[in-house]
Amino acid sequence: MNPQISVVIVNYNSGSALASTLGSLADGLAGLRWEAVVVDNASTDGSERPAEARPNVRLVRHPANAGFAAGVNIGTAVSAAPFLLVLNPDCRLQSGIGGLLDELQRHPACGVIGPAILDTSGTLQESARGNPDMLTGLFGRTSLLSRVFPDSRHARRNLRAGVLVDAPGSSQPVDWVSGACMLVRRSALASVGGFDEGYFLYWEDADLCRRLRNAGWETRYSKIAVVTHDVGQSSKNARGLANREFHRSAYRYFSTHVVPQKWHPFRIAAWLLLMLRGAVRSLRR
């Protein structure tokens, strides 16, 4: 019988995290027909091996590290279900994915929906966001201003998960949700040509949701489903690469969606500030 959901996991040197994630699938997807595809981006730590022996799981070994967006596209191409659960290798399903699927199907214009994501201490992560703009760097998830002024208008616009109160079994439209865990309608993803592979790591989720909205699709967020995210299990093994790609991808998003005019002073200023921020962060590591 054909699967209802294809889980797509992109793995790169995630240590023991992938085994825990795969172990959570059977309970997290109980009552659903599912398959899982693990796309391994040339890991060198053997972290992909648990995918070889799991039922319902297919391992695709890629000969090089193609990045997250390309990895999801590879997994999408070899999977079959009409709905795709894009899942980080350091996320564990807890509950409610069936309800999340019901909510996605209840809204035909919804192309992607994200669940509540908790860190390992049980704290709600800000996985539902407002569109990145000129002030996102000042009022982003990890910024000093957001920590000092969490109730400010700009912080609440950028960080939506903590201020959204869902009625039981409901969802709310948001600008974008985290790619750590998102349930995507395959037809919607196909309509925009999949994930943009110009994003090697980071910001591809914001870009996808923006392109989906431009194509007439909606992004929603619901706390009916819960996922635990042990952040950064892959990136901690390649901190220099992660830092560089975060800032490169941030500029790609900004120059594509916020200020597309090539010689606009705000675009030049953004490039300079992002390069400076990246350099400072690299010195701290």
Image (cartoon, helix red, strand yellow):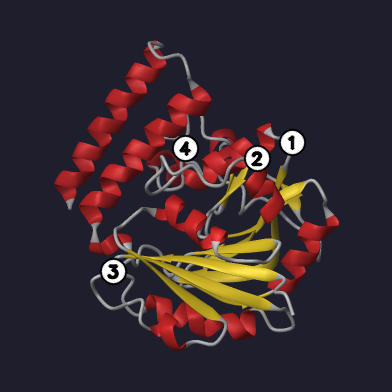
User: Which residue is at 61% across, 54% downward?
Assistant: 162
Q: Quadrant of residue 272?
A: top left
Name the spot of residue 176 as percent of width and height, x first: 60, 45
Task: Judge from the rendering whether residue 238 lies leftward or rightward of residue 157; answer left or right.
Answer: left
User: Relative to residue 31, is residue 72 drawn left or right?
Assistant: left
Q: Residues within 10 Å of mark 2 (few under 14, many from 20)?
A: many
Secondary structure of the residue carrying numbered label 4? loop
At mark 1, the secondary structure is loop
Identified by mark 1, the residue type is Gly
Residue assigned mark 1: 216
Q: Label 2 belongs to which residue? A: 212
In the rendered view, tell whether residue 108 sits above or below residue 90. above
* Residue occupied by mark 4: 139
Q: Count neighbours of disc 3 (C-alpha within 10 A) and say few if under 14, some if 14 to 19, many if 20 or more.
A: many
Q: CA distance from mark 1 to mark 3?
A: 37 Å
Name the residue type under label 2: Leu
Q: Is residue 134 visible?
A: no
How far apart are labels 1 and 4 at the CA level? 28 Å
Residue topped by disc 3? 43
**Residue 271: horizontal and vertical position, in percent?**
32, 25
Q: Specify which label sits upstream in the sequence, 1 or 3.
A: 3
Give the number of marks: 4
Between residue 104 and residue 197, name the one nearer to us: 197
